[in-house]
Image (cartoon, rainbow, N blue to C red):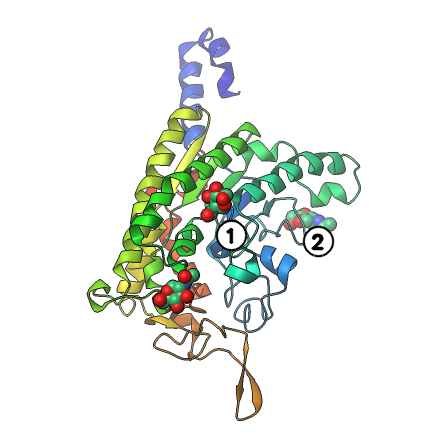
């Protein structure tokens, strides 16, 4: 008996009505069984997009888990990988990856360096990806339409592309915005100038959520942005005075901008809940989880929270010009900039910009049950 047939049921005996009502209540609280994930974001959740289009992230990326480069800026898996795994779904193929991809249970539109707003610079000039969130939406929109035309041809396409119904049952995940902030910092904008851009940035974010909703998307899982002021690539590049360093050693002004962005993002999510009557939007406070990890690293079994594991030089084992996987010349010999830390499983920062697999797993374990979510609903129930 479906919940929708209650009117018919009420004309039957009261006892059976109550049984059905009880079943419906349980069903509504049951797990969502998301059949697919569509992800939008930056390097925090890129599983191969930038690598496919602009060259593979080389070794030692991927070595802990995949044992070779796997399109991720990490020694292993990302939070989005743990999300997929815990929902019983395969790791997401990058939409841009033409080789070996399987989109039957979703697609990943994220690329490393992506911003919400399109930048006016090339990847080479600034390091920001041309695949900004609006472009990720164009790709999704095209995928939505064409995947069904191709799937209807049958054969292997039925196994490689999602069913049409999955688009309205899927979980839509977002982790983007960090680079809109760093783009400003790296242009030497004041924190007030960076903050002044945030309404426009979030306006463009809102547009994309609405556009996905118009294509049938209903369940949205939105990560806020992390404490960028604790990342070596920010602390190394942005001039910070002694008074601007917090007790943990992070750059306060940049973290305050991130928190400001997050407050505004939360407001946007509240606004979208009112506008999109059939949507479920979960706001996930990844900032607090990451900051807790960095500020209590030892307590949680990690060490040197502000030092990159893979990199070389400087206070943070990070060099803007020669990063993890790059080559340096020492005494006439070319040497790979590799792992400098003894054990990535007790390191938090992988390459000065991204978290290690161990940190990603730790972060995932904190957010999966809804403790850091608004509303406080677990990942598996994020459709209610
Ligand atoms: C890019 O340039 C356009 C036109 O000048 C401007 O409207 C837009 O705000 C710029 N984008 C960014 C991210 O600065
Ligand atoms: C694609 O992945 C799905 C789910 O893991 C699997 O059932 C299917 O066989 C795969 N298709 C191909 C062609 O490998
Ligand atoms: C930002 O300021 C630093 C230090 O004054 C300078 O070296 C750098 O060129 C500036 N960057 C931009 C994009 O103006």
Task: Decide: is 382 above or below 339.
Answer: above
- Mark linked to residue 114: 1
- Mark linked to residue 98: 2
Is residue 345 visible from the viewing direction of this image? yes
Name, please, the residue furthest toward the bottom: 331
Position of residue 173 in the picture relative to residue 164 (left or right): left
Q: Earlier in the sequence, mark 2 or mark 1?
A: 2
Q: Tag 2's secondary structure? A: loop
Quarter of the image for residue 253 reads bottom left
In percent of the image, x 59 and y 34: which residue is there?
167
Give how far across and how far down residue 110 sits, in percent. 54, 50
Give how far across and how far down residue 359 sits, in percent. 40, 63
Q: Tag 1's secondary structure? A: loop
Position of residue 227 in the picture relative to residue 116 (left or right): left
- Mark linked to residue 64: none
Whether label 2 lies within 8 Å of ligand 2 gets the answer no
Nearer to us of marks 2 and 1 is 1
Task: Decide: is 271 above or below 246.
Answer: above
Position of residue 301 in the picture relative to residue 19 (left or right): left
Give how far across and how far down residue 101 sits, in percent. 68, 52
Number of other residues with Cα within 10 Å of mark 1, as a class: few under 14, some 14 to 19, many 20 or more: many
Number of other residues with Cα within 10 Å of mark 2, as a class: few under 14, some 14 to 19, many 20 or more: few
Give how far across and how far down residue 127 sits, in percent. 51, 60
Foreground residue, 88 or 81? 81
Quarter holding the C terminus is top left
In percent of the image, x 41 and y 39: which residue is there?
200
């Amino acid at each position: 008996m479906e919940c929708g047939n209650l009117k018919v049921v009420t004309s039957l005996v009261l006892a059976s009505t109550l049984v059905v009502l009880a079943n419906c209540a349980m069903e509504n609280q049951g797990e969502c069984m998301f059949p697919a994930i569509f992800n939008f974001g930056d390097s925090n959740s890129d599983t191969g997009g930038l690598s496919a289009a602009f060259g593979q992230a080389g070794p030692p990326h991927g070595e802990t888990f995949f044992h070779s480069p796997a399109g991720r800026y990490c020694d292993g898996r990302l939070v989005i990988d743990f999300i997929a795994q815990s929902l019983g779904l395969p790791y997401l193929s990058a939409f841009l990856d033409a080789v070996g991809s399987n989109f039957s249970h979703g697609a990943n539109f994220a690329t490393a360096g992506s911003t919400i707003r399109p930048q006016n610079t090339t990847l080479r000039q600034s390091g920001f990806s041309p695949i900004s969130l609006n472009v990720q939406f164009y790709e999704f929109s095209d995928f939505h339409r064409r995947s069904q035309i191709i799937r209807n041809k049958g054969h292997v396409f039925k196994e490689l592309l999602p069913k049409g119904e999955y688009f309205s049952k899927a979980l839509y995940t977002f982790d983007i915005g960090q680079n809109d902030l760093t783009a400003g910092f790296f242009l030497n904008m004041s924190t007030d100038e960076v903050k002044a851009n945030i309404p426009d940035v979030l306006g463009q974010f809102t547009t994309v959520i609405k556009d996905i909703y118009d294509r049938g998307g209903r369940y949205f899982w939105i990560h806020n942005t992390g404490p960028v002021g604790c990342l070596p690539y920010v602390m190394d590049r942005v001039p910070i005075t002694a008074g601007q360093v917090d007790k943990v050693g992070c750059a306060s002004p940049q973290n305050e901008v991130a928190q400001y962005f997050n407050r505004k993002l939360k407001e946007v999510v509240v606004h979208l809940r009112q506008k999109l009557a059939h949507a479920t939007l979960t706001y996930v406070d990844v900032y607090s989880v990451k900051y807790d990890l960095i500020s209590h690293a030892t307590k949680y079994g990690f060490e040197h929270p502000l030092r990159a594991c893979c990199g070389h030089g400087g206070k943070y084992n990070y060099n803007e010009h020669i990063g993890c996987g790059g080559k340096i010349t020492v005494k006439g010999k070319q040497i790979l900039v590799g792992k400098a830390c003894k054990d990535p499983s007790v390191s938090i920062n992988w390459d000065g910009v991204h978290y290690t697999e161990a940190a990603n797993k730790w972060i995932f374990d904190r957010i999966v049950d809804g403790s850091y979510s608004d509303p406080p609903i677990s990942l598996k129930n994020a459709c209610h």
